[in-house]
Image: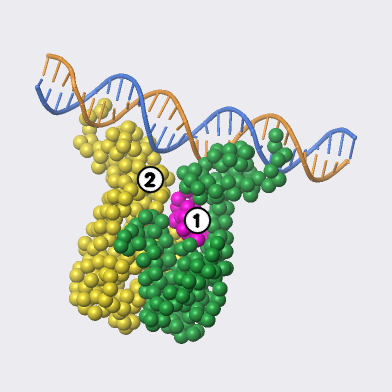
Chain colours: A green, B yellow, C blue, D orange
DNA sequence: AAATGATGCATAACACTGTTGCGCTACCCA
DNA sequence: TGGGTAGCGCAACAGTGTTATGCATCATTT
């Protein structure tokens, strides 16, 4: 009997799909499975999202929203380098908490033949743009060399993305675990941007404590 | 008529699959398609590789071999920092030339439900281990701070991987193109490892010229 | 209030995928 | 000259995304 229960099937489908992706991985994402768990038929996926790709796209946007939520919890202090590093930790923490989602957002082509459009990528870049403000303040306070803040932010993004990706891929093991690489990579990045070694080490250490507080669940 | 033509169906299947992956992407990788192009039946895939995953695994090893081949063409000079940067360029060049293969090698879970085993990853790490020698010499000559060469090599790997992944994902556009990010990221990495800014810039510039020569097709 | 339109979903089918059991064929070896 | 066996063609099964068809319900209009 159509048009009776579930005042909003859309959100139900998205929630179910996101949960299935998180709990059982990409291979669990099928129209029939999703429809069954949402107690509807596969057609609902097509009326609301135009197909499986549309549903995946919606989940990807949900993933960007979660990343932005992580970033929004980072406080702005008088140590902009630490602020930047906390952002890095938040980036990694979000990827770990939503590993399959993360792969869909940045992993190129992956699940159910879904491919990102230029609009999708632009949305992702917009979320990442909040890092530029941190870098700006790092330059203003003399911690970083004068230069293109957007480029330095990209270096940060690139390095964090590479580490998270290799970590989720299982490539980082003893004695170069993801945790160990992450800490030293932060120092390398900050020093490479112009900061002193001691100041960089101190700010990275500060960011670790702050992350435990500001990003506490 | 079995057992007549094609003295070695194995290599034919691998070649066909690798070509299809390179030319038409992951969605073209199907047992029937591969069997048709190799002028055999889908059963050949199972007798030789035990299934689609086995064939993909063989292709992944082919990808590692190509990466190692790229690395082997890098010369060893008295500028170890430039040597390291040429390796970075070779890494990126290989990924660009074999983009779909690269995604299968390092992109976590992707095509046809294939998943890397620990042996596969160990093989990949072994190929990457050739970078450590460069870093060692960077430390010996005083260009880099004393420390764990393996860790610095990982920083290099992580950053190159992140850049290549975002580049292939289409995330790096004007004014922060992949080319621009790559050059400045190299300088940041080298400076972060302990080198001076001027020396780093010079070695990165040197590596660009050397790459065009040593990795010329 | 009743008829009309459109919306949203259920059912079933189509083309496709990986995978498997069966059986034949061509080879190797005794 | 016989097995024995390895390698592959054929057909079928369960699964996928997608689409055509039809029906039930709502919203709207008259």
Quarter of the N terminus of chain A within the rendering: top right
Dot 2 lies on which element? loop
What kind of secondary structure does the magenta stretch mostly adopt?
A: helix
Viewer-nearest residue: B215 or A39: A39
Residue segment shown in magenta: A94-122
**Which residue is located at x 54 percent, y 45 percent?**
A52
Q: Is residue B56 above or below residue B183?
A: above
The residue pinned by badge 2 equals B114
Q: Position of residue A136 (x, y in %)?
A: 50, 79
The disc at residue A98 is 1
**Which residue is located at x 23 percent, y 63 percent?**
B130
Viewer-nearest residue: A213 or A58: A213
Dot 1 lies on which element? loop
> On what subunit does the disc labeled 2 rest?
B
Q: Which image quadrant for residue B84?
A: bottom left
Q: Is residue B56 visible?
A: yes
- Disc 2 from disc 1: Cα separation: 20 Å
């Amino acid at each position: 009997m159509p048009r009776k229960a579930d005042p909003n099937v859309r959100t139900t489908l998205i929630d179910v799909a996101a949960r299935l992706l998180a709990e059982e991985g990409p291979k669990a994402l099928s129209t029939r499975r999703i429809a069954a768990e949402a107690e509807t038929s596969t057609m609902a996926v097509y009326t609301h999202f135009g197909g499986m790709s549309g549903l995946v796209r919606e989940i990807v946007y949900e993933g960007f929203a979660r990343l932005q939520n992580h970033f929004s919890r980072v406080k702005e202090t008088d140590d902009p380098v630490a602020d930047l590093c906390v952002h890095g930790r938040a980036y990694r923490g979000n990827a770990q908490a939503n590993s399959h989602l993360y792969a869909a957002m940045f992993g190129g082509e992956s699940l159910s033949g879904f491919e990102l459009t230029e609009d999708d990528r632009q949305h992702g870049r917009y979320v990442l743009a909040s890092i530029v403000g941190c870098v700006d303040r790092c330059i203003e306070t003399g911690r970083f060399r004068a230069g293109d803040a957007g480029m330095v932010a990209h270096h940060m993004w690139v390095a964090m993305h590479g580490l998270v990706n290799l970590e989720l891929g299982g490539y980082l093991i003893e004695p170069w675990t993801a945790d160990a690489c992450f800490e030293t990579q932060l120092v390398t990045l900050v020093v490479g941007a112009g900061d002193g070694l001691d100041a960089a080490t101190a700010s990275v250490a500060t960011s670790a404590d702050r992350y435990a507080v500001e990003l506490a669940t």
